[in-house]
């Protein structure tokens, strides 16, 4: 690289990132040595060394930063802790952790990483001590403790249910490396165990690895629908139309005589194309759904107020106080917009009617109506609980996080997939991994 380009920090950082993503840390290190140092390229290179299982070089970089009086940030400290976890030596962990400022030790991400590090260094007491200090443990913290407890279970007590539980915990927390490590050590892998690992890969958008695992399973077994649906759902989560189409085409070949599964798969594919704005393909798929005789599944939400169950359907107008509920919905929407919320049209999977707007369609989702009803009945409510028959959409998820913050009210949504606990600090228990 010409010397004049080496002064361009954005170019250097991009090139470092490219080398690391290609697994070429030696070239990244060479470039790093010739350029002006910044906290960003320190973090990039430390992350690269961790990915290559070279934690000692990560520690060397951290020591360089200290010598050059460069103050770390949360990314640097997370990289440091991950490197220490890879080494797994208690005394080394102790010697480095003292360099992390106390203000960072209160951060949930740091605390979760420390639980994992202390566990891997053999100090369950330290891990438990860190866990107990977390004011609001999230799924990562609980999962880190779960994995450590799993490691302490005698092998003779491990069975399919135990393995599926721990793999599912990793899957819902994005802990792919931990799940892979556990999966590799399972001697007898059942259909459910394969399915849990495929789900983990799919949620993390590791579609190639998930497909390879399906291929491995099918060498000796018949195809399993849930494995393909997990893969297709993963593609839907990130609106990856090419992967979704490839999976769908394969499903049509593998399950030609099963209309119900294909209906569900076709619906997911339709949602992918609608989300990316390819309305022509979405329209063609909707026609295919009509041929299959598919019926649209409406969103339903239930909430209990004063021991009375109220049910809301998406865009429901049947409630006796419907006008008041929609007035509250509009009030909440104004508050969201004032706090920077932008409604995400990619979650609308059909053309808008003439009298509709993006805001009106998304605000009509059943869980938002149920939340508005709670606030209408009790403006000072501190805890709201809603059950939803479908999976919460991405726009509702972002909106409810903000509602919980603005209205200072914890909101719990049980959807078709999992529990979401929205805290008043704007965080959800799923850490946006759903």
Image (cartoon, rainbow, N blue to C red):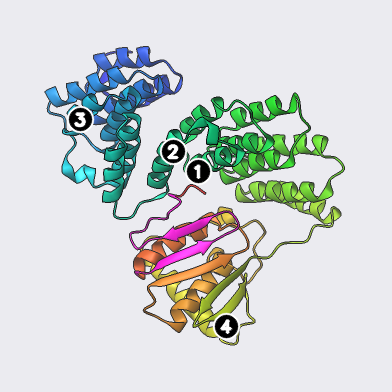
Q: Residue 88: percent from the left, percent from the top?
A: 32, 25
- Tell whether position 387 is magenta: no
Could you say which disc has been placed on residue 322 in the image? 4
Residue under the point 41% across and 71% down: 383
Give the mark, 1 or 4, whose residue is nearer the N terminus: 1
Q: Residue at x 49, y 83 (%)?
A: 306
Q: Is residue 312 left or right of residue 18?
A: right
- Is residue 322 positioned above or below 51 on the image? below
Question: Mark 1: few, some, or many residues within 10 Å (few <14, many ≥20)?
Answer: many
Nearer to me, 370 or 280 = 370
* Label 2 SS: helix
Image coordinates of residue 133 in percent, x first then y, are 26, 50
Asked if residue 48 lies left or right of residue 274, the reply is left
Q: Which residues are magenta?
A: 408-431
Report how far apart the C-alphas of labels 2 and 3 lie in the structure. 22 Å
Q: Nearer the viewer, mark 4 or mark 3?
A: 3
Q: CA distance from mark 1 to mark 2?
A: 9 Å
Q: Which sits earlier in the primary sequence, circle 1 or circle 3? A: 3
């Amino acid at each position: 690289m010409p010397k004049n380009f080496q002064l361009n920090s954005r170019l250097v950082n991009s090139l470092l990132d490219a080398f690391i993503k290609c697994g070429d840390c030696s070239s990244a290190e060479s470039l790093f040595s010739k350029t002006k140092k910044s906290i960003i390229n320190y973090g990039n290179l430390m992350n690269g060394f961790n990915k290559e299982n070279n934690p000692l070089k990560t520690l060397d970089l951290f020591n360089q930063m200290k010598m050059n009086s460069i103050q770390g940030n949360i990314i640097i400290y997370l990289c440091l802790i991950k490197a220490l976890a890879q080494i797994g030596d208690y005394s080394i962990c102790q010697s480095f952790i003292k360099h992390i400022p106390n203000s960072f030790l209160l951060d949930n991400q740091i605390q979760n990483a420390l639980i994992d590090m202390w566990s891997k260094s053999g100090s369950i007491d330290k891990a438990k001590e860190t866990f107990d200090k977390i004011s609001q443990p999230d799924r990562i913290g609980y999962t880190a403790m779960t994995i450590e407890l799993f490691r302490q279970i005698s092998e003779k007590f491990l069975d399919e249910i135990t393995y599926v539980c721990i793999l599912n915990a990793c899957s819902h927390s994005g802990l792919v490396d931990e799940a892979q490590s556990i999966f590799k050590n399972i001697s007898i892998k059942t259909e459910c165990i394969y399915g849990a690992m495929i789900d983990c890969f799919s949620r993390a958008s590791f579609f190639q690895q998930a497909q390879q695992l399906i291929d491995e399973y099918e060498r000796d077994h018949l195809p399993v629908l849930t494995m393909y649906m997990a893969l297709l759902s993963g593609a839907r989560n990130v609106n990856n139309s090419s992967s979704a189409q490839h999976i769908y085409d394969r499903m049509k070949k593998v399950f030609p005589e099963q209309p119900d599964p294909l209906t569900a798969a076709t619906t997911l594919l339709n949602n992918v194309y609608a989300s990316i704005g390819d309305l022509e393909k979405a329209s063609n798929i909707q026609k295919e759904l009509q041929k299959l005789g598919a019926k649209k599944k409406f969103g339903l939400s239930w909430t209990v107020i004063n021991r009375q169950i109220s049910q809301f359907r998406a865009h429901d107008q049947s409630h006796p106080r419907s006008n008041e509920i929609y007035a509250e919905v509009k009030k909440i929407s104004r508050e969201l917009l004032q706090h920077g919320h932008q409604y995400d049209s990619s979650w609308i999977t059909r053309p808008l009617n003439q009298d509709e707007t993006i805001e009106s369609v998304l605000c009509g989702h059943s869980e938002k109506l149920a939340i508005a009803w709670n606030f209408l009945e009790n403006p000072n409510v501190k805890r709201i609980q809603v059950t939803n028959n479908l999976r919460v959409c991405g726009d509702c998820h972002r909106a409810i996080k903000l509602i919980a913050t603005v209205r200072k009210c914890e909101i719990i949504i049980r959807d078709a997939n999992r529990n979401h606990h929205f805290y008043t600090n704007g965080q959800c228990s799923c850490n946006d991994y759903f």
